[in-house]
Image: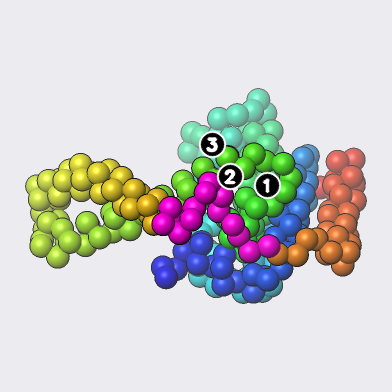
């Protein structure tokens, strides 16, 4: 199996933990991070969730750094742009560029919220398979038709990627990308045939499901619900964060 988010979601150290517990922990903590008026709490959340990902879920640090590179880069870009172009009180001028104090403060807050929110979503994505996430949403009242469509779409993504990989490797083994001209020609052929190949593979997958008595529902392994011990852990973890949120919102910290 390819080293991917889906792979780690099925093999991490928290695989057998209740998906409801992981979803509740990630969603409640993310809401606290987004609602925080101060960057301290989101940064603490990002640090704590990263510890859970690396040590409790046993996700390799090298993979997690690559996984977080794009959102962190987006957050840094947002911070720089807000510091340079948003605000009315110049803090310092460097090489003709003005850094505004209020823009810098807002940029730091947005950056911290991005880190906090992303770490919560990363915790959920890297520890809980998507079918279990949708199963829990179904228990909360999400329509069954919506869940089935979402799961089929999720499966189709892997079919699409597999077809693209097979076609690219076949072209590359025949020197299809040996030059700029050949690369454009091969890329055009790949794009033109990919939709048709993916459509045919999708039809094959659906017929296979029907042959195995598919009747519009995709059963999943039922895992335990949130227990008393897990509920207490969520209450303590997010309760302490809420206390910190109250202190920082009143200007006691930072």
Residue pictured at 12% horizontal, 56% vertical: 176
Residue 12 within the segment the image draws in magenta: no
- Residue ID for mark 1: 138
Q: Which residues are magenta?
A: 209-222
C-alpha gap between disc 1 and disc 3: 41 Å
N-terminal of the two: label 1 or label 3? 3
Q: Position of residue 75 (x, y in %)?
A: 57, 46
- Residue ID for mark 2: 147
Residue 81, numbered circle:
3
**Tags 1 and 2 touching, CB below 8 Å:** yes
Secondary element under disc 2, as helix, strand or loop, is helix
Q: Is residue 171 left or right of residue 153?
A: left
Q: Residues within 10 Å of mark 3 (few under 14, many from 20)?
A: some
Magenta-colored segment: predominant secondary structure: loop
Q: Position of residue 63 (x, y in %)?
A: 50, 67
C-alpha gap between disc 1 and disc 2: 7 Å
Secondary element under disc 1, as helix, strand or loop, is helix
Quadrant of the frame with the N terminus: bottom left
């Amino acid at each position: 199996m390819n080293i991917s988010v889906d792979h780690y979601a099925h093999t991490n150290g928290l695989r057998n933990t209740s998906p409801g517990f992981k979803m509740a922990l990630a969603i409640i903590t993310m809401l606290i991070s987004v609602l925080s008026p101060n960057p301290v709490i989101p940064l603490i959340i990002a640090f704590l969730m990263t510890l859970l990902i690396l040590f409790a879920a046993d996700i390799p640090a090298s993979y997690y750094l690559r996984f977080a590179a794009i959102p962190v880069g987006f957050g840094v870009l947002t911070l720089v742009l807000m510091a340079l172009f948003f605000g009315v009180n110049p803090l310092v001028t460097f090489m003709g560029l003005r850094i505004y104090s209020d823009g810098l403060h807002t940029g730091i807050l947005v950056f911290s919220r991005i880190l906090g929110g992303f770490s919560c979503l990363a915790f959920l994505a890297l520890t809980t398979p998507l079918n279990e996430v949708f199963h829990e949403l179904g228990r909360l009242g999400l329509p069954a038709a919506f869940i089935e469509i979402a799961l089929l779409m999720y499966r189709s993504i892997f079919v699409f990627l597999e077809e693209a990989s097979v076609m690219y490797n076949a072209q590359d083994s025949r020197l299809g990308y040996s030059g700029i001209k050949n690369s454009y020609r091969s890329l055009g052929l790949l794009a033109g045939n990919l939709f048709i190949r993916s459509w045919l593979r999708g039809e094959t997958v659906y017929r296979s499901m029907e042959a195995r008595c598919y009747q519009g529902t995709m059963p999943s392994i039922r895992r335990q619900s949130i227990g008393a011990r897990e509920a207490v852990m969520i209450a303590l973890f997010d309760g302490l964060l809420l206390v910190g949120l109250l202190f920082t919102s009143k200007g006691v910290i930072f």
